[in-house]
Amino acid sequence: MSMRTLTVRIKRYVPERDRSPRWEEFKVEADPHDRVLDVIQKVKWDQDETIGLRRSCAHGVCGSDAMRINGVNRLACKVLIKSLPSDVLTLEPILGLPVIKDLIVDMKPFFDHYKSVLPYLINDDPPPTTERLQSPEERARFDDTTRCILCACCTAACPPFWGDNKYVGPAAIVNAHRFIFDSRDRGAAERLDILNDTEGVWRCRTVFNCTNACPREIKVTQAIQEVKQALLTGEVDTHSVVNIHQET
Amino acid sequence: MNYHRFDCIIVGAGGAGLMAALEASKLAGTAVVSKLYPTRSHTGAAQGGIAAALANLEDDTWENHAYDTIKGGDFLVDQTAAEVLCREAVECIYDLEHMGLPFDRTPDGRISQRRFGGHTKPNPVYDPAAPAGAEASKPRIPVKRACHSADRTGHMILQTLYQQCIKQGVTFFDEFHMLDLIMVEGECRGIVAIEIATSELHVFHAKSVLLATGGFGRMFKVSSNAFALTGDGPAIAYRHGVPLEDMEFYQFHPTGIYRLGILLSEACRGDGGVMFNGEGERFMEKYAPNLKDLASRDVCSRSIYQEVRAGRGVGGKDYVYLDIRAETINKYKTSPTGEPVDSAWVSKRLPDIIDFARTYLGVDPIHEPMPIQPTAHYAMGGLPTDVHGRVLRDESGAFIPGLYSAGESACVSVHGANRLGTNSLVDLVVFGRRTGREMARFALDRPFQSLPPKPEAFVKSEIESVLARPRVEPWVKIRDEMQRTMMDECGVFRTEETLTKARDVLVDLQKRYRSTGVQDKGNVFNTGLLEVLELGCLLDLAQATVASALARKESRGAHSREDFPARDDSQFFRHTFIFKDGEGPGRIGYKDVDVILRQVDGRMEPKYPLEIRKY
Ligand SMILES: Cc1cc2nc3c(=O)[nH]c(=O)nc-3n(C[C@H](O)[C@H](O)[C@H](O)COP(=O)(O)OP(=O)(O)OC[C@H]3O[C@@H](n4cnc5c(N)ncnc54)[C@H](O)[C@@H]3O)c2cc1C
Ligand code: SF4
Ligand code: SF4
Ligand code: FES
């Protein structure tokens, strides 16, 4: 495949320079196999070093480079140029979190929500001298939600979160789910209490945006539904994988 | 200027830094300073597993693990440290499980374990008289020792440790980038860091400082390492006169995705994958007639390099193919059982690899071979430490009060000349924990020592001068030349000639580096400025690597000198210590390898006698 000439449109905001966000365009030669991240760095290194973005692993495992790519939340390191429908690449920061500079948003509110759901194993029983036992089925029960990399693609795609960023958001619920359904954990009641709050799971209107945005293909909406179900029934089944809403 | 005071400062929030933080904060006031959000650290990219002789699925002992570690490191491993690693690995894994780490499970609910390269145990039916090739002819056989959480063991370790830090209320300074150590009268008394969001400088006054900044694979053109892995900790300490140990030993993993360097696990070849050159030849038959594609990491990487150099890369370029198609596995009868397999079997065995290849190569490995090349992967060398993480002042073994290192930035040395797979993650938790305890104990025993006036002055003037310099040339040109030079001249193969060339190129690059500036003069997330400062660290470490490699006139583990192809225990059974002198590398000293002796028939004999490393 031959090189493509892209028009990269970046929504710029440099607080020391811009009073409000503005669009800037760059032309760049890109290999179809390049990642969007490569293209942004090429522009940054060759044309305008002031472009702000976060990145580290460059292969979709660290969660640094969530951004709106042609209108949808993606990790820039997981989208290849050849998958773009046209030669115009539009880049914006994710929505719902304050912009600090260009593609960089303030992640503090996001991490605060994450921390609010007690995202750690709670079990005060003295541990055995070796491992606590857990069957492969119990382990499978919460496998999907252990894969979260805290990239915020989901939360920043959630309309209720845009409207009110006090809502804990899907990522925090995913991480609560990871512990609520872990057979070794004893903190489910406490977490469910937190999520029963006005800013908890009931803000979710099941729009599925979050599931579509997740670069790890976590069934986010299903996890939220399972938490809602646990609240309604007062029961947490840590043994069998239940499919309340089969997602496609 | 912002001033903070903590008993313990931990720089780095990967596996090593977080493990240390959990320990230290139980005893003393502790803060973690990290240029990345903790969960973005590269520990999260580790896939395969973490080694510990739990013996959950078959007999195993920590002694077996220690033997493998020492042999895998081509005997440049410090043996007491290796025994500490392998003994304490077991309780550390249980600790991680108690913290909530979701290990995969065996049917009876215990932690599941899998096989990994170089991890073995004695063959119970071994018979030296058995015919070659028979099961009984093998003195050692593979053992299931790697504890795992699917193919994201590192992700789960990083998440679990961070979760525990939240639970314990550890203080974090996220997106704070350390730029200097405060060294006074041969002691470490704190650090200077820049707050990335504002470019404000912060002085952290401390009694003990831990450098856990990870690796520095970004000095090479093709690497499995994240952008952030630029060796800041070792480089900054080196500038303060702290030696670096065994820098010439850098591991190249044979199967990185072409150009990108993203890792394709060893499991590809374990399951029958075969490598081909541009002429369609299964070249490993020439280099390793017995094990072929399953030879060790260093052997395979060297073979690929040879092919490319001889012009037999694909299309004459610098890559070869890794082929995991069922038809290929069947043609060469390389499946684990020797029986034929189908595409569905391959898809089930290697789902992540297939996903990476589809995403990043646009290649479907079910139908096509994958372009690969060796990728710079792991630094065996780094800051010399003892088994408590205390950084050594020189080859005498004396240490620097207040300065600690753990994880990939440290050289304990448990990996010697070549690290075994799954042994880094266990190094992080075992030595992270030990170091956290030690630095807190040290801090509790002494008052804060005074700081010099304006400890941030040096950093301030450095930054001002980078910002003031005209952009004579783009700094990325300097970086690209360094990466190309290190890959070509100080990579898998080295000679006096290539190393001398690299040395001269680096001197020139240093000069150019010091005369060019950056375009971005702003204060908010000036990542251009930080990238330039990171490049400065990489350049210093690259020079130390080349100088150490020039001095080691033998081949051992990952250090392969074509002009000195044999291991030379009479001269080089010892660790390299390199010191910085003015602008560049200076004195090189050597420290004997720590050897454990034991009594046999009234005589003292080495517990792990030297042997030629063969698998
Ligand atoms: C793709 C891949 C797969 C791997 N798979 C395995 C495996 O299966 N098993 C195994 O045992 N090993 C594996 N390894 C090796 C292992 O993952 C690493 O060696 C290990 O994770 C390093 O951990 P660390 O804590 O030393 O550093 P890292 O996790 O790299 O963390 C470094 C930290 O230092 C911080 N930092 C750096 N510089 C500064 C600064 N100037 N100021 C402030 N903070 C700073 C960063 O923010 C980061 O938090 C793998 C490595 C790679 C690349
Ligand atoms: S399903 Fe719920 S959490 Fe997800 S985007 Fe929709 S409203 Fe938000
Ligand atoms: S659930 Fe998915 S999209 Fe949301 S933070 Fe986790 S990895 Fe990102
Ligand atoms: S850079 Fe790590 S997820 Fe994209």
Image (cartoon, rainbow, N blue to C red):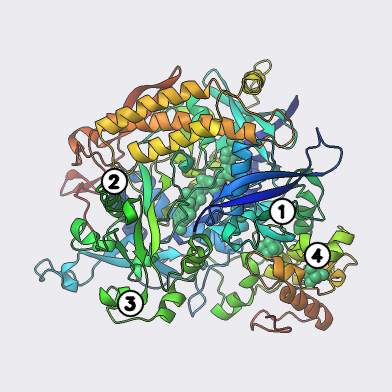
Is tag 4's residue or tag 1's residue first in the polypeptide sequence? 1
Left or right: B316, with A59 as reference point: left
Q: Nearer the viewer, mark 4 or mark 3?
A: 3
Q: Which mark is residue B327?
A: 3
Q: Nearer the viewer, mark 1 or mark 2?
A: 1
Q: Which chain is disc 2 placed on?
A: B
* Residue B272 vertical position relative to residue A62 in the rendered view, above or below: below
Mark 4 residue's CB less than 8 Å from ligand 2: yes
Give the spatial CA distance, label 4 vs label 1.
20 Å
Q: Which chain is disc 4 placed on?
A: A
Give the spatial CA distance, label 4 vs label 3.
46 Å
Q: Is residue A56 visible?
A: no
Q: Which mark is residue B557?
A: 2
Instruction: Please tell me in which quadrant of the rendered image residue B187 appears.
Output: top right
Q: Amino acid at mark 3?
A: Glu
- Figure quadrant of the C terminus of chain A: bottom right
Is tag 2's residue or tag 3's residue first in the polypeptide sequence? 3
Q: Name which residue lies at 75% across and 58% down.
A: A114
Element type where label 1 sits in the image: strand
Residue marked by disc 4: A158
Give the spatial CA distance, label 1 vs label 3.
42 Å
Residue marked by disc 1: A90
Give the spatial CA distance, label 2 vs label 3.
34 Å
Q: Which chain is disc 3 placed on?
A: B
Q: Is residue B416 visible?
A: yes
Element type where label 2 sits in the image: loop
Left or right: A206, with B438 as reference point: right
Give the spatial CA distance, label 2 vs label 4.
52 Å
Residue A231: % across, % down? 82, 77
